Amino acid sequence: MGLAFNLFLAIFAGTGSFLFGYDSGVMTDVIHSPNFLAYFNTNKTTPIIGAINSTFSGGAVIGSLMGGLTMDRFGRRKTVMLGAIVNFIGAALQAGAQNLAMILVGRILAGWAVGIMSMSVPVYQSECAHPSKRGLMVGITQQMIGVGFIISTWVGYGSAHVPDTSSFSWRFPLGFQCAPCLVLICGIMFFPESPRYLVEIDRVDEALRVLRKLHYNGSNDDEIQAEFHEITATIEAEKAITAPGWMIMFKVKPWRTRLFHATLIQVCTQMTGINVIGYYQTILYETLGITGNRNILVAGFYNIVGPIFNLIFITFFLDRVGRRTPLLIGTIAITIALICEAVIGSQVSGATGSRKDSLSIAGVFFLFLVSAIFSCSFGPISWVYASEIMPLSIRGRGSAFATGIGNWLVSTIWSQVSPIGLGSLEYKFYFIFVAFNVCITLPLIFFVFKETKQVSLEEIDLLFGDRALGTLPQNLNDKEITQTHEKTKSVYV
């Protein structure tokens, strides 16, 4: 089966990422529905709208952290399935909401589910992928997030063509996500567990069979045996130094460094401003003079841009050019695009006639440009980098922390404050992200982040100065992990 099966597994597991994109994007259309706003007695820039989005992100923080426990105890597949079950319940509550409390509880559950899947899907894809194709396989996470945004927007656009008195305009988009939840719940158990997780729980024979199923091309038996030996040797050595609990990630220096990298790539991704644009783009278009159904139509086209550029990038470039270079270029380009957007925003309010139309078109162009650049840099690379640099000993807990804190906690803050900030600061709001990109993101990528393209998950240990082998300090408050180089040599020779 080899590459074709591996690709199919990555795409199907990406249904969890599709739900991430759909559930994140659906509120863009829902808050544009006059019936929804009237039903809950609110408008687009009130704290209530911020609360609806921030409770989703807040639930995702909880889900991400919980996913670290379920991945270690029940495995990757069952964690993804659990996320789909919780998402189904949350979607049903939102679609049938009779009051604001039901919407908020439904959003919390949906966020909880998306948090689980946002950290477990990339890890599952990464552990199953061949090193030469890992960028493509894990990049599918961002691709499916983008597809989810596309579907949510066009479902919302179609549902908007009903009378303002009909709640169909927001109930159907919220309920639609139940369908992919059922597909994922029913189908995920037909796929194999990650070979690395199988080795970790001492099912080594099954792990080798799964590895052959994923990577065999008809003539690479020796390569698969070598890969299997490296996986088993590393995991056996890691078991000797693994300690229970979450604090060990912070007390062992090599692990703390890798956790630091994984968390920061997620923080920097959020600080591009991409989710603020994604959640509140209809508000941004209104400030550019684009209103009514035309507003949702533009949002629909916006959501198509990212997945197109992401697909081209992960298919042809990511595994060739690596991680650092696209991130550096992406940071600079996004910063320039946001500055241009702010300049245009400062001119729109006083413009009239054809000049205002020209400024509106230019404003839309630069928002689209941010999406295109993001999709060729932070979009896919944030998931790839964060999932591949974690040692297996802390991969579940580490990925949970990085995604929950770095991605979702930051997203929660922006979800809550952005409607208020956009309403009061308008175009000046963009300069928050510009300043962060220039002062923090760019130096971090240039001086701190490492290149990880086309090396195995086990070989990535060397990039961080350890093989995850040796012994833990007797006093876990020690800053350094004691390395036993003789053990390292004896295991890997």
Image: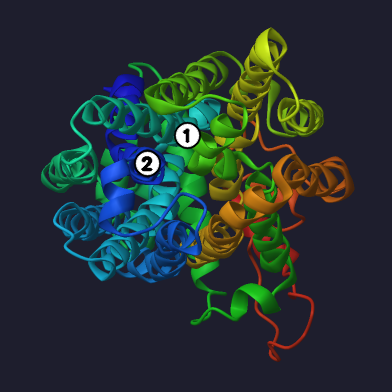
Q: Residue at x 70, y 84 (%)?
A: 473
Q: Nearer the viewer, residue 459 or 477?
A: 477
Q: Is residue 391 left or right of residue 428?
A: left
Residue 17's disc number: 2
Q: Is residue 326 left or right of residue 278?
A: right
For the question of whether residue 154 can be seen, the reply is: yes
Task: State the image coordinates of residue 429 (x, y, percent, origin top left).
Answer: 73, 47
Classify 378 as above or below 300.
below
Going by the picture, which residue comes out furthest to the bottom?
475
Q: Nearer the viewer, residue 13 or 109?
A: 109
The amino acid at mark 2 is Ser
Task: State the image coordinates of residue 335 (x, y, percent, origin top left).
Answer: 79, 33
What residue is shown with label 1?
Answer: 142
Classify 415 as above or below 33.
below
Q: Earlier in the sequence, mark 2 or mark 1?
A: 2
Q: Residue at x 42, y 20 (%)?
A: 294
Q: Nearer the viewer, residue 202 or 277?
A: 277
Task: State the image coordinates of residue 445 (x, y, percent, origin top left).
Answer: 80, 42
Residue 350's disc number: none
Splitting the image into 4 quarters, where does residue 416 fall?
Answer: bottom right
Q: How many marks?
A: 2
Q: Residue at x 68, y 11 (%)?
A: 358
- Disc 2 vs disc 1: Cβ atoms closer than 8 Å? yes
Classify 371 as above or below 51.
above
Kind of element beneath mark 2: helix
Kind of element beneath mark 1: helix
